[in-house]
Image (spheres, rainbow, N blue to C red):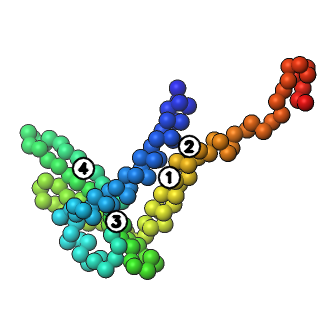
Amino acid sequence: MVKKWLIFMCRFVPPIFLVLIPGMAIYDTISPWEVAAVPLKEYSDSYTLLIGGSSRYYLSNGKKHWRKEKTYLVVDPALTSSTTIDISADSKGHVEVDKRAGGLLKIVVYYLSLIVLTWFSWFGYRYFAHNNAPKRDAANGGRAP
């Protein structure tokens, strides 16, 4: 049961993320988040990609509240440095911005690992199958010819 679940997860989750990550970046380009416009304005000469996000909705004292978080990767045009920016906002109007240096190498390694895992789970078994052993023949006393 666990093996089937693991095979299913390795086969279908990486391709979903391979499509989801560029899809989020394209969606943010078409429909940018207004809250992120101010913190990202200082990086207008750099490449900005949305690489993650989440939304939470909850009830507190009978009132509906929400909290949105998005993570952006900002890369300079020369591709020599990058900054990861986490922006979060809630229904009360609080906006938090957290900046960290780096992140480009981590995203590249993560995306390449998704490509390798997707290829291996869909096509790799054909290349790494252990069917090269000589066939045993019952007429030959179970010995390989």
- Front position in the image: 77 or 134: 134
What mark, if any, has residue 55 been given in the picture?
4
Earlier in the chain: of badge 2 and badge 4, it is: 4
Does residue 81 appear left or right of residue 25 in this picture?
A: right
Q: Residue at x 18, y 42 (%)?
A: 58
Judged from this view, the residue extending furthest toward the left is 62
Does residue 60 appear left or right of residue 99 in this picture?
A: left
Give the Cα separation between the discs numbered 2 and 3.
Answer: 28 Å
- For numbered disc 2, what is the local secondary structure? helix
Q: Residue at x 50, y 52 (%)?
A: 114
Front position among marks 2 and 4: 2
Task: Report which residue position mark 2 lands on.
Answer: 121
User: What is the x, y in percent for residue 87?
Assistant: 26, 62
Above or below for 18 versus 105:
above
Residue kind at label 3, given as amino acid type? Leu
Residue 11 appears anywhere in the view = yes
Give the Cα separation between the discs numbered 1 and 2.
Answer: 10 Å
Q: Quadrant of residue 72?
A: bottom left
Q: Residues within 10 Å of mark 3 (few under 14, many from 20)?
A: some
- For numbered disc 4, what is the local secondary structure? strand
Task: Report which residue position mark 3 lands on.
Answer: 49
Residue kind at label 1, given as amino acid type? Leu
Determine contact: label 2, label 3, CB under 8 Å. Answer: no
